[in-house]
Amino acid sequence: MTQAAQAFDVAVFTGTFDPVTLGHVDIINRGRTLFRRLVVGVGVNPEKTALLSLDERADLLRAVVAPYSNVEVKTFSGLAVRFVREQGARVMLRGVRTLGDIEAEFTMSLANQVLDDGVETVFLMAHEEYSHISSSLIKQIAELAGEDDLRKFVPEAVIAPLMAKIRGRRRG
């Protein structure tokens, strides 16, 4: 296999996934058709306070992607570009929703090129129906609305654990 063919053999899609949304699932589903193997890296962002623990986020993602035989979920801390290399990948898959996302992702992509010029970033535009969905929005909806409303934004497997966490936070 040539080096060019190997470069697109494995891709890594990283994020905090707090919680995983239908937009994330859309990028995962589309990415898994472009690459032989897709690793979803659930990471720690020191600038964000996560609602769900790292293990909870990874477990929810595993439940959601279980039907996809070529997708696996792993946790990591540290630089995403290093995690990509640890997975034997040369492609970092990123989803973008808005112009703000594009600007932020462009900056991150340039930094990643400096850190490892052998890792390429591939961007997938969010489908229109998911372009407004963010994990922050989901947490607000979970706090203020209910399960029926959440079904429009997150996979079914996420609803009960997310609502339990929200209820626990209210009591705490």
Image: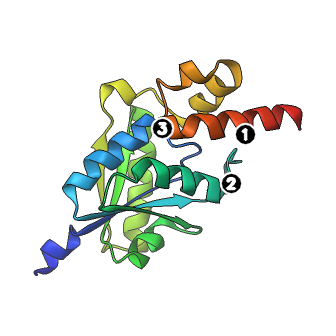
- The CA span between labels 2 and 3 is 16 Å
Q: Which mark is residue 76?
A: none
Q: Nearer the viewer, mark 1 or mark 2?
A: 1
Quadrant (top left/top right/bottom left/bottom right) for the C terminus: top right
Whether residue 16 is visible, yes or no, is no
Name the residue tied to disc 2: 53
Circle 3: element type: loop
Kind of residue indicated by mark 3: Thr
Name the residue tied to disc 3: 21
Residue drawn where x is 29% and y is 62% of the image: 70
Q: Is residue 59 left or right of residue 164?
A: left
Residue 162 placement (x, y as % from top left): 64, 37
Compared with 116, 160 (above or below) is: above
Circle 1 packing at 10 Å, graded few (<14), some (14-19), many (20+), is: some
Residue 74 placement (x, y as % from top left): 49, 66
Quadrant (top left/top right/bottom left/bottom right) for the N terminus: bottom left
Residue drawn where x is 49% and y is 33% of the image: 154
Q: Earlier in the sequence, mark 1 or mark 3?
A: 3
Report how many numbered discs are placed on residues in the image: 3
Are the residues tagged 1 and 3 within 8 Å (C-beta)? no
Kind of residue indicated by mark 1: Lys
